[in-house]
Image (spheres, grey):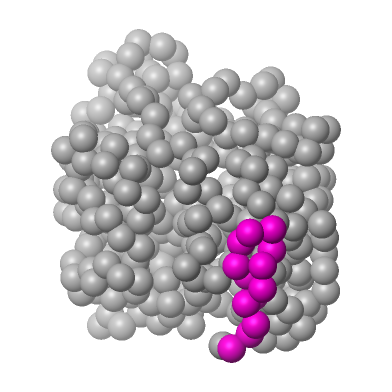
């Protein structure tokens, strides 16, 4: 592409008037957006494709600038204790749920096992417990790669549960933080990582694909690294969600200028298929903390800082999650987060 590089408040950008997925034109859905969280410069918009309804950031930072708009602001690592250790009621619930999710032996006693079984009938609690392992059921079965592993919090949980884990993380400070916990981290973006082929039993990538310039290339590289019988789990914000409909331009996951794409479930599926993956299932959940609180804050003040991942959600945020986790049983694509599972289509 030879689009002219221009300056947008100090960020080098190119115009992105055409849909990055299908090439059709896009109308401006939200204009005049500023960074709401980390004070990155520039004025941004989101366009919506007239053909496939994909949402994307316009203008688009050039490849060398991706990552720069938050290099000096983003939280690179936070001390957090394991969500599976302790004696609180919710910790007992979580151990019980994961025990019945294939991680046998995790529940400490029959009370916890009972709680785990009972929560099958309480979907909002089950969803939140399942989030601890990014919806990867037990038992642990080999090598797990997390693409965009950040400070390695999720990998530490999975290692404790018995997986052999590896992480991929472009941010040097986050990678160093993860390595301090003895984790095996490749510090690189996936495009330059030269991952081994057919190597991983499970690959997870949580809230990463919306940051990459070329999602199909990203998924193709993940597919190559996946074993023929392996599973890839992709998580990303959902443009069709109830929260997006409610909050519009104040919806927190738009995150200009760091989110380049906001997918609809069907468009994410189309990307996976173009990457040679076979989609097993795609669903949405309302389990992500603070989406509601953050969107309310942006609506009222124009800002929200996600400084501390251990911050407590308001009662309204909890209520929103509970309601949405029930709503998705009626409207499967109403949740804030898409969860897509894929296999390697080349298999067999
Ligand atoms: Zn399109």
Image-quadrant location for residue 85? top left
Front one among 116 and 239: 239
Q: Is residue 248 left or right of residue 287?
A: right
Farthest residue, direction top: 87
Taking the spot 55% from the left edge, 61% from the top edge, the residue there is 210
Magenta stretch: helix, strand or loop mostly: strand
Whether residue 4 appears in magenta in the rendering, the answer is yes
Front one among 116 and 244: 244
Taking the spot 74% from the left edge, 57% from the top edge, the residue there is 43
**Residue 342, above or below 22:** above
Image-quadrant location for residue 25? bottom right
Front one among 39 and 146: 39
Q: Position of residue 21 (x, y in %)?
A: 61, 79
Whether residue 298 appears in magenta in the rendering, the answer is no
Q: Quadrant of the C terminus?
A: bottom left
Q: Position of residue 172 (x, y in %)?
A: 32, 49
Q: Quadrant of the N terminus?
A: bottom right
Q: Position of residue 155 (x, y in %)?
A: 29, 42
Task: Tally the marks.
Answer: 0
Residue 293 visible in the current orientation: yes
Q: Which residues are magenta?
A: 2-14
Q: Is residue 205 left or right of residue 127?
A: left
**Residue 4, above or below 257:** below
Q: Position of residue 185 (x, y in %)?
A: 23, 50
Residue 296 visible in the current orientation: no
Q: Is residue 73 left or right of residue 290?
A: left
Taking the spot 82% from the left edge, 60% from the top edge, the residue there is 31
Front one among 184 and 99: 184
Taking the spot 39% from the left edge, 20% from the top edge, the residue there is 91
Q: Is residue 218 left or right of residue 252?
A: left
**Residue 336, above or below 317:** below
């Amino acid at each position: 592409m030879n689009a002219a590089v221009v300056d947008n408040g100090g960020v080098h950008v190119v115009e992105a008037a055409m849909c990055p997925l299908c090439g059709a034109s896009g109308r401006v859905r939200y204009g005049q957006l500023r960074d709401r969280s980390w004070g990155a410069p520039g004025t941004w918009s989101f366009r919506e494709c007239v053909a496939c309804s994909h949402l994307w950031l316009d203008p688009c930072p050039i490849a060398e600038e991706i990552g720069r708009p938050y290099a000096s602001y983003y939280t690179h690592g936070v001390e957090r204790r394991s969500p599976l250790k302790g004696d609180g009621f919710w910790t007992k619930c979580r151990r019980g749920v994961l025990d019945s999710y294939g991680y046998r032996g995790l529940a400490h006693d029959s009370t916890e096992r009972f709680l785990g079984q009972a929560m099958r009938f309480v979907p909002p609690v089950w969803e939140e417990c399942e989030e601890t392992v990014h919806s990867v059921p037990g038992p642990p079965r080999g090598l797990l790669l997390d693409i965009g592993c950040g400070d390695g919090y999720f990998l530490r949980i999975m290692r404790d549960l018995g997986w052999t884990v590896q992480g991929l993380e472009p941010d040097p400070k986050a990678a160093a933080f993860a390595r301090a916990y003895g984790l095996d981290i490749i510090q690189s973006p996936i495009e330059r990582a030269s991952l081994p082929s057919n190597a991983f039993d499970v690959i997870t990538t949580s809230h990463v694909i919306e940051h990459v310039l070329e999602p199909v290339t990203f998924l193709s590289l993940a597919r190559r690294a996946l074993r023929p019988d392996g599973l890839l789990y992709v998580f990303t914000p959902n443009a069709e969600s109830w929260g997006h409909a409610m909050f519009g331009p104040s919806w927190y996951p738009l995150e200009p200028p760091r989110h380049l794409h906001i997918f609809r479930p069907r468009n994410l599926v189309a990307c996976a298929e173009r990457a040679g993956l076979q989609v097993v299932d795609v669903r949405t959940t309302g389990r992500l903390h603070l989406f509601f609180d953050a969107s309310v804050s942006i609506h009222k003040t124009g800002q929200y800082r996600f400084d501390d991942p251990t911050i407590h959600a308001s009662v309204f945020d909890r209520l929103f999650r509970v309601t949405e986790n029930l709503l998705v049983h009626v409207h499967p694509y109403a949740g804030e987060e898409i969860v897509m599972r894929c296999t390697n289509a080349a298999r067999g």
